[in-house]
Image (cartoon, grey):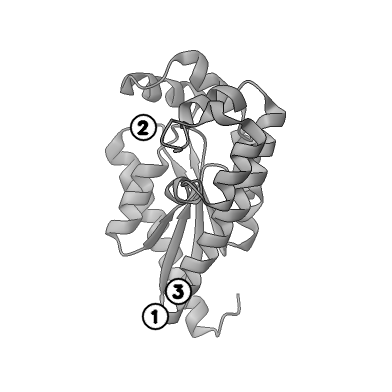
Amino acid sequence: MVIVAGLTGGFGSGKSTALRVFQKMGAFVIDADKLAREVVKPGKPAWRDIKARFGEKVFYRNNRLNRQSLADIVFRDRKALQELNAIIHPRVLEEEKRLTRDYRKKHENGVVVVDAPMMIESGSHKWKDVLVVMNTSGENQTARLLKTGRWKKAEIEKRISAQLPLPKKLKLADYVIDNNGTLAECRKNAECVFREISKKAAYLKLSGGRV
């Protein structure tokens, strides 16, 4: 049986590390961030909607979306962020479901893992079979993101505050991957969770989909 797992967590929580582990262990992975970049390519419906709402100032001269300019707007204005999410999230969800359907047509068994930072906020976790949440302290999130050199502390704080607080995400989790230790520990924890999900998929197959 094919089981669909949602993977989420806060900004800088280590989702990418867990996703690489899942993929190495045989999961078919769907990266919602990559899908979000696809749906805003020039000429696509989401691209047109963003241009209508935010204007030319968030686009380069070649008509490609200037993601940083857009981020500078929406992470200072909660209403603007909600409007942007309303444009992008439904299109991303359509692609997630399409890719999952295509996988199910070709495979009787397996694990599909959808990685999305705003999965719970958008409500797209509701169609997943299980939900996996990364557990990382705010201090560790900030420290790791600062270490990359890509973000300033104020920007990190704005992005984290735009997401649902971690305790609320953990309440909805079927599985939790702790990432407050070393990278090796995070990978080991992700491996354990993937084995549990695989066992659940095997059980559901034997029981005919009954829990």
The foreground one among 6 and 202 is 6
Can residue 107 be seen? no
Residue 93: x, y in percent?
A: 57, 57
Residue 26: x, y in percent?
A: 31, 65
Q: What amino acid is labelled 3 in the image?
A: Asp
Q: Which residue is mark 1?
A: 106
Question: Gap in Å between the C-alphas at discs 2 and 3?
Answer: 37 Å
Residue 178's image quarter? top left
- SS for dot 3: helix
- SS for dot 1: helix
Q: Is residue 209 left or right of residue 53?
A: left
Can residue 168 be seen? yes
Q: What amino acid is labelled 2 in the image?
A: Gly
Q: Taking 98 as reference, is 78 above or below it?
A: above
Residue 169: x, y in percent?
A: 61, 42
Question: Gap in Å between the C-alphas at discs 2 and 1?
Answer: 38 Å
